[in-house]
Image (cartoon, rainbow, N blue to C red):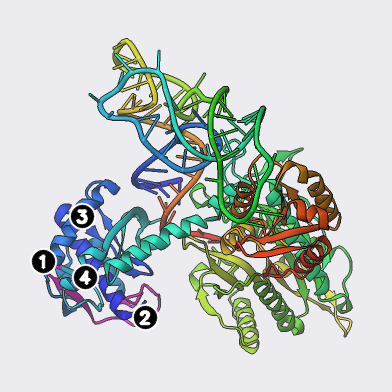
Amino acid sequence: MDEKLHALRHSAAHVMAQAVLELYPGTKLGFGPAIDDGFYYDFQLPRPITTDDLPAIEARMKAILHGKHAFQRAELDIDAARAQFSDQPFKVEQINALAAGEMDEHGNAGANAAASVSTYTHATFTDLCRGPHAADTGEIPVDALKLLSIAGAYWRGNEKNPQLTRIYGTVWESKKELDDYLWRLEEAKKRDHRKLGKELEIFILDEEVGPGLPLWLPNGGVLIEELEALAKEMEHNAGYVRVRTPHITKEALFLKSGHLPYYAESMYPPMELEGARYYLKPMNCPMHHKLFAAVPRSYRDLPLRLAEYGTCYRYEKSGELFGLMRVRFMQMNDAHLYVPEELFEQEFMGVIDLYLKYFKLFAIDKYVMRFSTHSAEGLGKKYVDNPALWAKTEEMVRRAMIHGGINFVEVPGEAAFYGPKIDVQIWSAIGREFTLATNQVDFAQPLRFDLKFINKHGQEEMPLVIHRAPLSTHERMVGFLLEHFAGAFPAWLAPTQAMLVPIADRHVEYARRVAAQLNAEGLRVKIDDRADRMNAKIRDAQMQKIPYILVIGDKEAEANAVAVRLRSGEDLKAMPLATFSALAKKIVGERSLELK
RNA sequence: GCCGGCGUAGCUCAGUCGGUAGAGCAACUCACUUGUAAUGAGUAGGUCGUCGGUUCAAAUCCGACCGCCGGCUCCA
């Protein structure tokens, strides 16, 4: 976002705060920043409000904008600031935090202690703020401003703190830009995987089955089979071996792994059987560690790469569930690599290389690699308490990524409980951020499981473990791919690859022969033999985003041909059946993104 | 889990002030036999999310619960 737009949005947030204070006296103010597509402000209101209250607030804001009030900066020392904001407890807390150096103005820890703070005043409203702002409220285009929604948001983002009411709004430099933005929001909804998943009959979520427990329809089944075939092929080529492990495990294993101490709140409660407590597994790693330890390992066996499309259950909070992207049962493209320390960089980057191959195959280009590290505060709570090994493994990852020339951003406080990781961050159609794939280091579980191998010198040595899931889980991957391709999958993934459209009933028999032949050759082909016009069938096939539409009439039946139309509407004209079959098999076999 | 909203046919939605529910598409049947994005006619389909309350009467008002949606927290 450019500076001007940022200033406009931040200024609009101040104006919203003024309007809310005027309409709801006694309101306490939280933070009110500009964000990617607009702004928000967090309030503790004297009474609850709903979206029905937004028009009144918006109207008040617009009246303020017309006043063309200048934004004026002032610098106050800490005591003066405390006095000025004495009736605003959240502001006083922030002033104290700034003064103590606990937090800089962005809320990041570890800043220098501030001797003074700045405020911005327009009209009757003054806010603690570092700016910058528009020159005056008249710069904010009245017709490019809109309040959007209301949400609860915890003070400072901590669920133990009071929950404030957040009002989201947006403002642009012109009405046209606002209208474009609102149009983009509508367009994004059309490629939402939940909508496409229903329209294309990929999956369902059934109230009686339970929240976050998707059921895959046959079309979804095809997607999963193809993704799994891809993973097996790539992993075979990269030296992985496949294993299989059960859905449930006794308590003792998860105590040993550290899941119960560190991860219990994301696990389903235990079931009691014959005096033992069993848990549904949230991750596959402990069982894979058992497989590593099951036989004596030599350095000659390493790296050992154990792969499994493991079945995991996580008790995500009900409000966190989101279509296929966040579920309670998932099948993960999981593997654990047992690696001597000196081979760490090579193996870790081997996984990164696998990521990049997949991204190329799917033409995924909008992602960020996030280097997720621990935070000192989390040690012993969120993270295994071993500062030395955190420092060491984080440096190993950082060095490997830099050597590999891979761009990444480093974010503290996002690590797994057992070690640092590289996460691939992507965005859903409606703009929500998710981790798609992950590549994690684990120094903690090898210790806990006492994993070892015999090195060249005949001594016992502990391997490092790399956990990785480049193809994410089936659930999140399919959700992401639905949105990424807007349902128009490459031919190799498409549940139906070709739809045969007989022009008249007399062509159905030939169509059946064609379908039988193409299906026998490994393609997924269907016939639309409904009593409908050809045009209707073409339209339906195209709406189902089926890659190839094969129209069959007298000419084709006579010439053993098919007339090929792509879902884009492009007409490849009639061609001999063998020609089409060769084309389709080539496109599918190469996992091509193109259809011709 | 928390804050706010929503829940009517398979889907998208209408239903005014409380008076026993409607459209389009889809499905099914029949007719048409069509040359590259919707042929026509007909039939069938709903305990209005669930349970309780108010009322002569509830899709409509009230409450609880379930589910979904937008956020927060959290995450593959």
The structure residue drawn at horizontal position 81% and vertical position 76%, both measured from the top left corner, is: A303
Residue type at the position of mark 4: Ile
The structure residue drawn at horizontal position 57% and vertical position 83%, both measured from the top left corner, is: A407
Q: Label 4, on which residue?
A: A140
Of labels 4 and 1, the one closer to you: 4
Residue type at the position of mark 2: Ala
CA distance for labels 4 and 3 = 16 Å
Front residue (pair A549, A243):
A549
Query: Are the residues under marks 4 and 1 on the same chain?
Result: yes
Front residue (pair A140, A460):
A140
Label 4 crowd bin: few (<14), some (14–19), many (20+), radius 10 Å: many
Of marks 4 and 3, which one's residue comes earlier in the chain?
3
Residue type at the position of mark 3: Ile
Of labels 4 and 2, the one closer to you: 4
Q: Secondary structure at mark 4?
A: loop
Label 3 crowd bin: few (<14), some (14–19), many (20+), radius 10 Å: many
Q: Are marks 4 and 3 in contact (CB under 8 Å)?
A: no
Residue type at the position of mark 1: Thr
* Majority secondary structure of magenta residues: loop
Q: Secondary structure at mark 2?
A: loop
Q: State the image coordinates of residue A468 (x, y, percent, origin top left).
A: 69, 69
Query: Are the residues under marks 1 and 3 on the same chain?
Result: yes
- Chain letter of disc 4? A
CA distance for labels 4 and 1 = 17 Å
Q: Secondary structure at mark 3?
A: helix
Q: Label 1, on which residue?
A: A124
Q: Quadrant of residue A341?
A: bottom right
Is A111 magenta? The answer is yes
Q: State the image coordinates of residue A506 (x, y, percent, origin top left).
A: 77, 43
Query: Are the residues under marks 4 and 2 on the same chain?
Result: yes
- Chain letter of disc 1? A
CA distance for labels 3 and 2 = 36 Å
